[in-house]
Amino acid sequence: MRVKDKVAIVTGGGSGFGAGICKKLSAEGATVIVADINLAGAQSVADDIDGHAIAVDVSDDASVQSLASIVMADFGAPDILINNAGITHLPMPMEQVQPDEFDRVFQVNAKSVYLTARHFVPHMKIRRKGAILNLASTAGLSPRPNLSWYNASKGWMITATKTMAVELAPDNIRVNALCPVAGETPLLASFMGADTPEIRQKFLATIPLGRFAQPEDLANAACYLCSDEASMITGVAMEVDGGRCI
């Protein structure tokens, strides 16, 4: 019960890594708000863990403001804020990515972190405590060709994590990031371009431990970083990648 009685928000909590994190935090005692643009997916996860589903478009200021208003009214300031929602463009040469695709990647992967900070950090500052966790990627540390703008958005997130950590430390708010390798999530086929046994094997050959990340892998790391056990850890971009970045 490492996060017992804490209030946690997980964006993109309706599937993939986010769903795994929601389940872990709930099992460890937290009240979990599953926030997702797909309300049906969020509700399904919330039903499994006795959590609370709220629809949100993390790229839209008004939508994030509405999320914050509901959370503050029903639960108070969150103890844990996890920016997990993310998307990618399909693998292709950088100049072939269309402007609307580029904009969408940065709106969801980068602007969302700014928006949740804008609407939740002031409340966390008043309480002078809290843990923020951003889901970055090994792509931000060891970029792969043909995912240039996705790579860049995750590199942005790692830098944002470090600067947030420095600025918010005096308020006793810790900020860390996780950098997973590709995992068994709905985005896997998009990262690889196609999901075939041959492409899977080629990708797995780049991971020393020889497997994709599972939601449980990220959930365990997230729970630790957001718990009081990690009270001296801030500004870290933890690789959860089976050795991919070595």
Image (cartoon, rainbow, N blue to C red):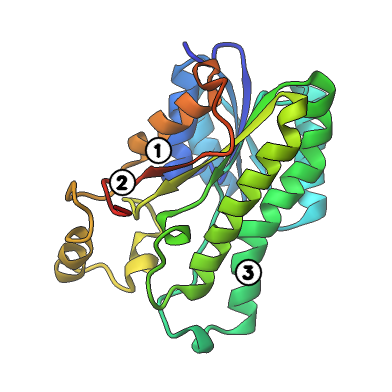
First of labels 2, 3 by sequence position: 3
**Residue at image x 48%, y 14%?**
2
Where disc 1 sits, the SS reads helix
**Residue 57 appears in view:** no
Q: Is residue 98 above or below residue 176?
A: below
Disc 2 target residue: 213
Answer whether labels 1 and 2 touch (C-beta < 8 Å). yes
Left or right: where does residue 73 sit relative to residue 186?
A: right
Q: Which residue is mark 3?
A: 104
Badge 3 marks a residue whose secondary structure is helix
Q: How many marks?
A: 3
Closer to us: 50 or 11 = 11
Q: Is residue 123 above or below residue 146?
A: above
Circles 2 and 3, Cβ within 8 Å, touching? The answer is no
Please provide percent x and percent y for residue 229.
49, 16
Q: Amino acid at mark 1?
A: Leu
Specify whether 21 is left or right of 168.
left
